[in-house]
């Protein structure tokens, strides 16, 4: 990769030089995180809070058990008349879904090629995308996702419907505690994110409109695995 | 004050009360006296220095502030019938005198400064008996009383003690009336729009009097109401409280 | 030594005040945002604790700024993100042009970035034959009309839906006229989806950059930020050099207070953490990610211990939502990239306190901005400081244009003011005259004329309080 920035080394030196010349002024203030630590709930309350927070921003929930969730997704796809569902064939959730999927009816479409060979189809012909999650956030409501080779980034963004699998036991108290629990503070994949609902905007007269650029609907398949 | 009520206080009139609302100053003094406090009113009071301070002319502000601090040598509370002037003396004097040879002296002075209603409620815990006719009022909180001094409803608590007074909530009570000292003449259009909205909100309450604890706000809101020939009046809270509770 | 080409906020503000539609649009929007923010902070203790923590985090970041920037650069490099440094907007624009040209990119789709507004990047790229298209709905709306944002979070807040409906029907191909917000949104979606699909490059801002992990954090609701940063093969991020924080853990409270303060949301739709380009085995994501770190006067602001607090800003916009001046005149009257209270302290520091002297005085110092600021920037105090700087060149500071707002008449006025008020005997004479003859001052006298635009002339009482207390003759000391 060529470096098209002729003045960069000088700028860098000059900027850092000016910042250093300013010197620090005073000791580092202490960080009192008590307000974050107060955010704690028991596992059942976490589920309730997450659901309430996400439903408030138009996320829809489907209840499922550890052995019924593929069927729940299928029923949903059939009911909504979705002709296909994008999935990651090598991801844990994706392969479990595929194993339970009947060949007739809504088609499972694997995201198994680089996007360059798939862009037109992805933007034009996919009705819904299915992803797993690595957790949820109780305080505000939110799903935590770590896209990667098995579950590409655009699965949760481009299709008009995003179906996400969430296991109740993985819901954390807050984003802060999730960062610690998932070890995100030490190492992160090229992309990780939190999603709380379908894409929305209030840019026209503060009127909420859903589905502006990303998915118009977010469906959380909530697996009750607390007992 | 260590729980004991002081027997003697200083009163600082402030320039706007001195010149435009002397009745409010007199009323404040009477309220203090009735609570059993001796009031000392030192001669030589002019202005706290806020206009120059806010405009960035700190040397001029300091010159004036020094002469004022010197009027209050004894370790007595200094009571002001104005939120913004009290804010200036209590909160901004330490800034103004930061690094000056007399900083410590000024800081000690600042620590003794109180806004009148704050002192009546928090220190003197005064009890009022309403002797007036039924009336509906509304309250305009001064920005500096709330944000600089941290008033927490003391004026409203005093009004609440008056059995014949109905306090109508003012929409956007915490929004500035548009005075802002020199702002009102440097940016008269914006300032005028702010006070126009304020008097519209005040009129909508159906009250007959707007009360406040700040000379600047009173002058501004009063001027705007008069320009509209409004029936709504403004009054300094001290004057209102004194008029309604003094034996006739 | 007067500042040249002073920009008069008063004139633009006065003009804006004459537009009832604009005033209604802002009043309604700001009232709504104030109520929504308040609902997010039901417990004052939680709010104060969160503000204190956020302030401490931002202060710590600034204290270690050069080290954190170097750490960020090293972490990014390890992750495959190429870091560039720009002292000026011109340099930043050239850097971005260079990156785009190296890839042969002709179209750029943009997520929302105030720093790119600061750089006037769109106009620059257009002049070089590269299409730069805004994809945030609000930014898209104003770009269609060649306007600038009137709010840092809600750029099209000055427009109502009738205006947008007319605009879409005229400017979007095959669009029919509708005032239905869902239909308008769907029109924009259709246009922009194709643009995301076709774009050669994407550009975004950065809400927080994490030094330890080399992560760029983006907060958004629409998904256009993710589209811009994940769909095109090239992603360029631009950030002001103050945006860095030490650890991802530090981002959690900042994010929590940002969305609540900005739009009264507990959480945004997306919180996107970008730590590298397309990784080994990944099927999508950009092949290249570049980060441009912009100074543009920030290191000069940084040099001043008091003014440095300006750089704590996390760009939530709460100060403008709560500002009684902004609410009435809207963002364009500021004639600056950053409007409202934060703009009132940032713009003069970037452009000069002399040319922006009128703006620095366009505040009643009511303190509403400082009260709601999630990182406790003392905006009113900084305004007063800048007022000092504007009229005094001898403060020993690094402030641009210091002393250039000074006028002989104002100097003289304050000297006279102090001359009278520090001499009680003189003051006594002056008030004696005022109480006896104050009525006679004509309403058309300078300054009084401004006051009486909206008010009656104040008339001094017949006897001052001091005079009455003297007459009382008791308790004097």
Image: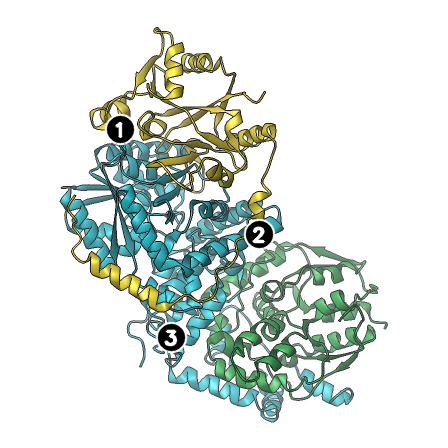
Q: Is residue C475 left or right of residue C395?
A: right
The answer for which chain carries disc 1 is C
> Is residue C184 shown to the viewer in this render?
yes
Image spot of residue A209 (x, y percent): 42, 34
Residue hosting label 1: C281
The answer for which chain carries disc 3 is C
Residue hosting label 2: C49
Of all residues, the one furthest to the right in this rendering is B247
User: In the rendered picture, chain B carries what hue?
Assistant: green
Q: Which chain is cyan?
A: C
Name the quarter where the C terminus of chain C is drawn.
bottom right
Q: Is residue B61 left or right of residue C344?
A: right
Q: CA distance from mark 3 to mark 2?
A: 33 Å
| Residue ID at (47%, 44%) | C252
User: In the rendered picture, chain A carries what hue?
Assistant: yellow
Dot placed on the residue nearer the N-terminal end, 3 or 2:
2
Image spot of residue C9 (x, y percent): 38, 66
Q: CA distance from mark 1 to mark 3?
A: 53 Å
Under circle 2, the secondary element is helix
Residue hosting label 3: C397
- Tags 2 and 1 on a common chain: yes
| Residue ID at (67%, 79%) | B13
């Amino acid at each position: 990769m060529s470096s098209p920035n002729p003045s960069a080394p000088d700028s860098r030196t000059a900027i850092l030089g000016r910042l250093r010349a300013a010197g620090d002024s005073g000791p580092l203030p202490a960080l009192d995180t008590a307000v974050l630590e107060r955010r704690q709930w028991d596992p059942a309350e976490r589920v309730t809070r997450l659901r309430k927070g996400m439903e408030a921003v138009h996320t829809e929930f489907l209840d499922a058990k550890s052995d019924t969730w593929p069927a729940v997704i299928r029923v949903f796809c059939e009911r909504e008349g979705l002709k296909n569902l994008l999935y990651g064939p090598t991801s844990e959730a994706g392969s479990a879904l595929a194993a339970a999927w009947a060949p007739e009816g809504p088609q499972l479409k694997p995201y198994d090629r680089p996007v360059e060979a798939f862009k037109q189809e992805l933007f034009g012909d996919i009705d819904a995308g299915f992803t797993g999650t690595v957790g949820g956030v109780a305080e505000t409501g939110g799903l935590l996702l770590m896209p990667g080779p098995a579950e590409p980034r655009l699965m949760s963004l481009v299709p008009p419907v995003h179906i996400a699998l969430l296991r109740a036991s993985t819901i954390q108290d807050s984003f802060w505690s999730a960062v610690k629990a998932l070890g995100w503070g030490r190492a992160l994949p090229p992309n990780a994110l939190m999603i709380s609902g379908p894409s929305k905007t209030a840019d026209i007269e503060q009127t909420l409109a859903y589905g502006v650029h990303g998915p118009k609907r977010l469906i959380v398949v909530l697996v009750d695995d607390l007992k | 004050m260590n729980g004991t009520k002081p027997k003697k206080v200083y009163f600082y009139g402030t320039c706007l009360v001195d010149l435009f609302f002397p009745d409010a100053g007199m009323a404040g003094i009477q309220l203090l006296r009735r609570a059993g406090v001796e009031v000392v009113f030192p001669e030589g009071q002019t202005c706290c220095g806020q206009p120059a301070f806010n405009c960035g002319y700190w040397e001029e502000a300091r010159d004036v502030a020094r002469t004022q601090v010197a009027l209050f040598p004894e370790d007595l509370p200094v009571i002001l019938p104005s939120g913004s002037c009290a804010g200036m003396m209590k909160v901004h004097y330490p800034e103004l005198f930061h690094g000056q040879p007399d900083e410590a002296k000024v800081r000690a002075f600042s620590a003794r400064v109180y806004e009148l209603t704050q002192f009546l409620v928090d220190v003197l815990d005064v009890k009022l008996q309403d002797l007036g006719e039924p009336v509906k009022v509304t309250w305009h909180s001064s920005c500096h009383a709330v944000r600089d001094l941290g008033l927490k409803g003391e004026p409203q608590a005093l009004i609440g003690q008056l059995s014949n007074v109905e306090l109508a909530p003012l929409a956007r009570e915490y929004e500035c009336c548009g005075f802002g000292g020199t702002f009102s003449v440097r940016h008269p259009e914006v300032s005028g729009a702010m006070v126009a909205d304020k008097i519209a909100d005040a009129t909508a309450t159906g009250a007959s009097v707007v009360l406040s604890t700040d000379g600047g706000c009173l002058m501004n809101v009063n001027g705007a109401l008069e320009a509209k020939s409004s029936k709504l009046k403004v009054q300094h809270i001290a004057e209102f409280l004194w008029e309604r509770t003094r034996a006739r | 030594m007067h500042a040249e080409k002073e920009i008069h906020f008063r004139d633009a503000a006065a003009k804006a005040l004459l537009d009832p539609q604009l005033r209604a649009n802002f009043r309604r929007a700001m009232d709504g945002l104030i109520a929504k923010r308040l609902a997010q902070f039901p417990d004052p203790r939680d709010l104060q604790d969160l503000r204190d923590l956020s302030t401490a985090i931002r202060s710590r970041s600034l204290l270690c700024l050069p080290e954190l920037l170097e750490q960020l650069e090293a972490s990014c490099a390890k992750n495959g993100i190429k870091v560039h440094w720009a002292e000026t907007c011109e340099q930043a624009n050239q850097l971005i042009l260079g990156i785009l040209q190296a890839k042969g990119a002709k179209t750029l789709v943009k997520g929302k970035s105030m720093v790119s507004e600061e750089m006037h990047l769109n106009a620059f790229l257009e002049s070089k034959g590269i299409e730069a298209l805004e994809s945030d709905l609000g930014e898209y709306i104003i770009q269609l009309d060649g306007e600038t944002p009137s709010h840092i979070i809600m750029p099209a807040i000055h427009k109502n839906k009738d205006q947008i409906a007319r605009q879409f029907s005229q400017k979007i191909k095959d669009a029919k006229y509708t005032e239905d917000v869902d239909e308008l949104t769907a029109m924009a979606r259709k246009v922009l989806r194709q643009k995301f699909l076709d774009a050669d490059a994407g550009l975004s801002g950065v809400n927080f950059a994490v030094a330890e992990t080399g992560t760029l954090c983006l907060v958004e609701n629409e998904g256009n930020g993710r589209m811009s940063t994940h769909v095109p093969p090239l992603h360029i991020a631009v950030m002001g050099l103050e945006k860095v924080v030490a650890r991802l853990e530090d981002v959690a409270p900042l994010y929590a207070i940002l969305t609540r303060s900005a739009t009264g949301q507990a959480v945004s739709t997306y919180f996107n953490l970008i730590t590298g380009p397309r990784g080994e085995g990944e099927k999508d994501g950009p092949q290249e990610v570049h980060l441009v770190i912009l100074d543009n006067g920030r290191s000069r602001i940084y040099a001043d211990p008091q003014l440095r607090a300006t750089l704590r800003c996390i760009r939530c916009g709460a100060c403008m939502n709560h500002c009684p001046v902004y609410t009435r005149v809207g963002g364009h009257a500021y004639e600056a990239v950053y409007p409202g209270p934060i703009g009132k302290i940032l713009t003069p520091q970037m452009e000069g306190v002399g040319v922006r002297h009128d703006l620095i005085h366009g505040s009643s110092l009511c303190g509403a901005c400082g009260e709601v600021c999630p990182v406790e920037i003392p905006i009113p105090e900084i305004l007063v400081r800048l007022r000092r700087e504007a009229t005094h060149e001898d403060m020993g500071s690094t402030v641009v244009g210091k002393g250039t707002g000074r006028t002989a008449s104002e100097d003289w006025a304050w000297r006279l003011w102090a001359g009278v008020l520090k001499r009680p005997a003189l003051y006594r004479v002056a008030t004696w005259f005022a109480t006896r003859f104050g009525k006679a001052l004509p309403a058309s006298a300078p300054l009084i004329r401004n006051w009486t635009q909206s008010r009656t002339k104040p008339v001094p009482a017949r006897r001052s309080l001091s005079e009455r207390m003297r007459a009382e003759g008791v308790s004097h000391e």
